[in-house]
Image (spheres, grey):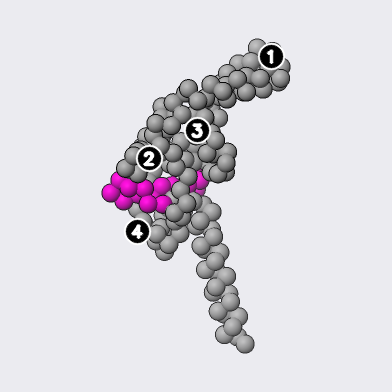
Amino acid sequence: MKVREVMTNRIPRIRMDSNLQQAAEIVALSGASDLMVVNEQGELMGVISAGDILRACLPKIDDILAEGGSLEQALALVLKMGRGLSRQPMAPLMITEPIIVDPDDHVAKVAVTLVQTNIHSLPVVRDGRLLGLVTRATILETVVGRLHSVSLDVGNSLV
């Protein structure tokens, strides 16, 4: 089975010149764990994850709590930082050389990569262009769908 058979064209993406607030909003609204960062031509420039965005905020929160500050103070900082995220560029936080896959790669190889690297999704790229996304979920959906089809075929042949 090839990646093209399991990839999705629903790609959570963001432009390279976006700020951290925009990235956080897209992650929050889409539920995506990763955003594909693209240039004006739609070429993949990098990936930013929800974890990258959270890590940009957490050190300051940890400092407040470590210094004996209250949770309320930490939460107030989160709200204050939320307003400041619009001034913080997203690009410095992104992974600029993400692992990519080709539409003709074998799904088994990609599944192993996803598990071994603890990554949730991989961009599908050909000639620099972002074509799709392969995720743990899209692989499982396809495999389960095929297993279901096979079991129906076997059940029908027994009748």
Magenta region = 112-132
Q: Earlier in the sequence, mark 4 or mark 1?
A: 1
Residue 82: mark: none
Q: Are marks 2 and 3 in contact (CB under 8 Å)?
A: no
Q: Residues within 10 Å of mark 4 (few under 14, many from 20)?
A: few
Q: Nearer the viewer, mark 2 or mark 4?
A: 2
Question: What residue did someone put label 2 on?
Answer: 38
The residue sitting at 30% across, 45% down in the picture is 128
Q: CA distance from mark 4 to mark 3?
A: 33 Å
Q: CA distance from mark 3 to mark 1?
A: 29 Å
Q: Earlier in the sequence, mark 2 or mark 1?
A: 2
Secondary structure under tag 1 reads loop
Q: Earlier in the sequence, mark 3 or mark 1?
A: 3
Question: What residue did someone put label 3 on?
Answer: 22
Quarter of the figure with residue 155: bottom right
Disc 4 marks which amino acid? Asp
Q: CA distance from mark 2 to mark 1?
A: 39 Å
Quarter of the figure with residue 27: top right
Question: What residue did someone put label 1 on?
Answer: 69
105 relative to 92, above or below: below
Q: Specify the quadrant that holds the N terminus.
A: bottom left
Q: Specify the quadrant that holds the C terminus.
A: bottom right
Residue 104: mark: 4
Disc 2 marks which amino acid? Val
19 relative to 5, above or below: above
Q: Earlier in the sequence, mark 2 or mark 4?
A: 2
